Image (spheres, rainbow, N blue to C red):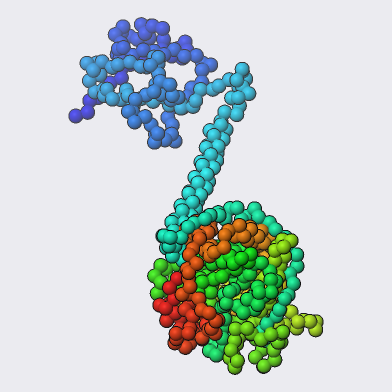
Amino acid sequence: MVGVFEVGAVPFNPDGWGPPDSTTATAPSTTTTLPLHVPFAPFSRSEKLGRIADFTRSFANANPSNRPSSGKPGAASSESPFDFSLDLDTFPLANPEDDSSFRLVDAKPPTRPKFGPKWRFNQHRPQLPQRRDEEVEARKREAEKERARRDRLYNLNRSNQNQQRREAAIFKSSVDIQPEWNMLDQIPFSTFSKLSFSVPEPEDLLLCGALEYYDRSFDRITPKNERRLERFKNRNFFKVTTTDDPVIRRLANEDKATVFATDTILATLMCAPRSVYSWDFVIQRVGNKLFFDKRDGSQLDLLSVHETSQEPLPEAKDDINSAYSLSVEAAYINQNFSQQVLVRDGNKVSFDELNPFANEGDEVASVAYRYRRWKLDNDMYLIARCEVQSVVEVNNQKSFLTLNALNEFDPKYSGVDWRQKLETQRGAVLATELKNNANKLAKWTAQSILASADLMKLGYVSRVHPRDHFNHVILGVVGYKPRDFAAQINLNTANMWGIVKSIVDLCMKLNEGKYVLVKDPSKPQVRIYEVPADAFENDYVEEPLPEEEQVQPPTEDTEAGEPNGTTNDVEAKETETQT
C-alpha cells in the first residue's frame, strides 16, 4: 500500500520572492502544515542556478560504493545545508538509501583562476596526460627493441655454442693420434692473421703434360638449357704426393731448393684459418731439406662440402648427404666437370715433358704440371708442383685456366635454389657459397694464384634430383681472375705466404725426422707431433701408381681414398676408405 504525501498550504508573499517573514500575516491560522526540521537555504540573486535535471550524464564510472565523495564535482558535500537525516517517525516512507544516492545536478568542475603564480604551467596542463602517454609508449617501444636485440644476440651466441659443441662431438681427427707421439707445439689460428710475407715472382723450372682447349660454349649455359654431366670412365687422374713425384726427386737431388710441396698442401696451409674440418700432412726433415707430404687416403684428396655452414649435415656416414659422402661426390663432380668443358677434338698443347705419372698408352686427363720455385730467404727456396686444367687462346696468346665445380645437393640446406636464382641472382648464389664453402673456394683461389692461372672457371653443378647422387647437370659456368676474386673474398696473398714462411721456419729448427701437422677437429689451431720414422710406411708405395676410374671395382693396385673420376663406385669407396 502506497502512502499519500500531503503538502501543506503554501503562503503567498506579496513583498517579493521566497516565503514571507511571518506566516501569521497571510495565513488564517497560526498552525502551519509545513514539514518540520526542513532547513531553508538562503541564496542571492547573483548566484548561478544549476540544471534542474541532466539526462545526458553517464554513471558508468560512478563510485562502486554508491557513496558521495566530498572531493569530486557533483557529489553532495558534508557541509551542504541539505545534508540531514530524516526522522523516520515523521517520514515513515522515507528510504535511508535515498540519501546515499543523492547527487547534485551540476557536475561541472570548479572554475580555476586563469592568471596566477602557476598560470604558465596551468595553461598546458590539459595536454600533459596525452604527452605523458606518448612518452610512456615511446619508452615501451624502445624497451621492446632492446629486448628483441638481446634475444637475437642470445640466440646467436647459443647457436654458435651449439655449433662448436656439434663440431667437437661429430668431427674427428683426420689421423689417429698415437700415444707414443710427442706433441711439440700448438699454434692457434689467431696468430696466423698477423703474419705477412712478400715473395718475388716465381720462376718456372719445368712444365709437364698436355692441355686441351676450353669450350667457350659452356659460358652460355643457363638453368633453362642445362647440360647433363658426363662420365669419363677411361681418363686417369693422379693424386701423387710430394716424395713420390719423380720430378721433385730429381730437382731435390740437383739441390734446386730446400722446401718441396704440392699446390694442394700449400693451399691447405695458406687457408688454414678458414678450415673447420680436421686435416693433416706429413713433414719430413732430411738433411737440410724439408718435404711436405700427404698420407695415402688423406682428406686432402677430397673436397669438403658445407664445411663452414651453420646448418648441420647428417651424422650417419652412409647417408648421401653426410660430410664424407658429399666429399666423395664433390671430387667426382669436379674431375668430370674439368674434362667435359673441353674441346675434345684431339688438339692439345704439349709441354717439355709428358705426364710424369702416366704409363705409355694410358689416356690421361687434361692437366699440366708447373714446377715453380719461390725465394723464401737468401739461401732458402721452395719448389711446388702446381696444376692447370685447360688453356684458351686470347689475342693470339695462350692463357692457362683452372677448372672447378661447386655442387648443389639439396636446396633446403643452403636456402637458395640454383635453378630459380642462378640466372637472375647469381651474386646471391655466390655469396651463399662463400658462406657455406669459404675454405674450399679460398683453396681453389690460392691454387690458381700459385699456378699463375690467367682465369679460374667455376661451374655450378646440381643433382637431377635431391635424392639422386649419381646423376648431375651443369647449370652454369662463370669465370674470374684469381687475384680479383681473392680480393673479393678477402684473401690476402701476403698473409698466405706469411703462414707458409712461419711454418717453414718452425720446421727448419726441428731435428731430422718425421713430423705430422694436424688441424685440431674442435679448436681453431694446429698441432705438430713428432712421429716414429716408420710411421705411415704402409700407406706409401715405392712407385706412383695410376689411379683407376671409380666405375671399375677396386683392385689391389687401386689407392684407397683417392677419387678416380666417376660415381659408380662411390658407395664402394665409402666403405673402403677409412679416414
Instruction: Check the image and report above or below for 522 versus 136.
Output: below
Residue 574 x %, y %: 43, 77
Instruction: Check the image and report above or below for 247 versus 51.
Output: below
**Which quarter of the figure has residue 116?**
top right
Instruction: Check the image and report above or below for 555 versus 412.
Output: below
Q: Who is closer to the viewer here, 549 or 394?
A: 549
Q: Please, which residue is most extreme toward the left here?
A: 1
Residue 299 x %, y %: 51, 71
Picture residue at 71% right of the left edge, 87% below the top: 349
Q: Please, which residue is most extreme toward the right here?
A: 395
Give the number of callouts: 0
| Residue 548 appears left or right of 366 | left
Picture residue at 72% right of the left edge, 76% below the top: 205
Q: Who is closer to the viewer here, 7 or 319?
A: 319
Picture residue at 43% right of the left edge, 73% below the top: 578
Q: Please, which residue is most extreme toward the front here?
A: 287
Residue 12 x %, y %: 40, 14
Question: Does residue 325 show up?
Answer: no
**Which quarter of the figure has residue 69?**
top left
On-image quarter of the C terminus: bottom left
Question: Does residue 113 show up?
Answer: yes
Picture residue at 46% right of the left edge, 53% below the top: 161
On-image quarter of the N terminus: top left
Q: Who is closer to the viewer here, 110 or 248?
A: 248
| Residue 383 appears left or right of 100 | right
Q: Who is closer to the viewer here, 497 or 100?
A: 497
